[in-house]
Image (cartoon, rainbow, N blue to C red):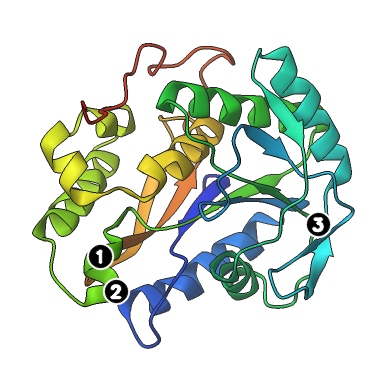
Amino acid sequence: MQDLLGLLVPSEIPPRSALSGALGAASGAVREAHPASLVVIDASWRPRTFAVPNLQRLSDAAGHDIGPVDVELADLLHETAIGYGLPSTREGAALSAGAAAALHALMPQGGLPALLLGVPTASPALLHEFGQALRQSVHELGRRIVAVAVGALARDLQAQHGGGENPAVGRFGAEVLDRLRSGSAEQIFEIDGALWIQARPETELGHLSLLLGYTTPDAQVEILGSGEAPGVFSALLAFRAPQSLPPLGQGPWADTQHPTPQG
């Protein structure tokens, strides 16, 4: 079996749902990978720039202790990101309730060091580059690290909280999965701009961009489960190492432009 490099995990998983069942498979994959630590890309943390925590311990918003921070990886990632020419800061942040629940479900025994990363507003190319900086740092440390991005694929807050329907959410989610399934991750950001705007992708898919930068767009993607609720389309995805990794600093998204509303 190819090495597990990353997971995309929803921040809300209804009990007794297809996603709930898929969570067991994801937890098993993490255990089989035997990672030295986890990197948590929390879509709920929206720093202004690429932020690496300067904390010794990770806690949730309620102040509950989650576990130790991988300080060595945090220090190296900060230095590597600056070396890549990316604005990187050191600041503290708590794990969101959804990310804390996902982390507990994946590793119920806890104990693994973790590193929390936020998702700034940036182009897919820049987020991809920060993911590459993470990969460079992990490579230099010589550790087995699994990155876990926590968030949905599309989230229309008005439909979600009003219990309404937004047909674009489901169409968009299905389109993203089709492109990942066919090995065309770099084409996600070529989805029709009108559909993109209507579906309201979670963090403009920033968490997925960062994850793909780390695992590479050539990663083998396994769709463990997906589900739709009013205003939300979520998927649980496993990213495994491709047959060969592209050189660091290169990739298919160098000239990718994010579909942005014109106003």
- Mark sitting earlier along the chain (2/3): 3
Instruction: Identify residue type, mark 2.
Output: His
* Snapshot quadrant of residue 65: bottom right
Badge 3: few (under 14), some or many (20 or more) residues near its Cα, within 10 Å? some
Task: Tell me the residue that label 3 is attached to.
Answer: 113
Q: CA distance from mark 1 to mark 2?
A: 6 Å
Task: Tell me the residue that label 2 is attached to.
Answer: 161
Instruction: Identify residue type, mark 3.
Output: Pro
Task: Tell me the residue that label 1 is attached to.
Answer: 158
| Residue 185: mark | none
Label 3 element class:
loop
Vertical side of 123 occupied by 170: above or below: below
Badge 2: few (under 14), some or many (20 or more) residues near its Cα, within 10 Å? few
The foreground one among 77 and 82 is 82
What x and y, as percent, mark residue 162? 23, 75
Residue at 55% from the left image edge and 62% from the top image edge: 29
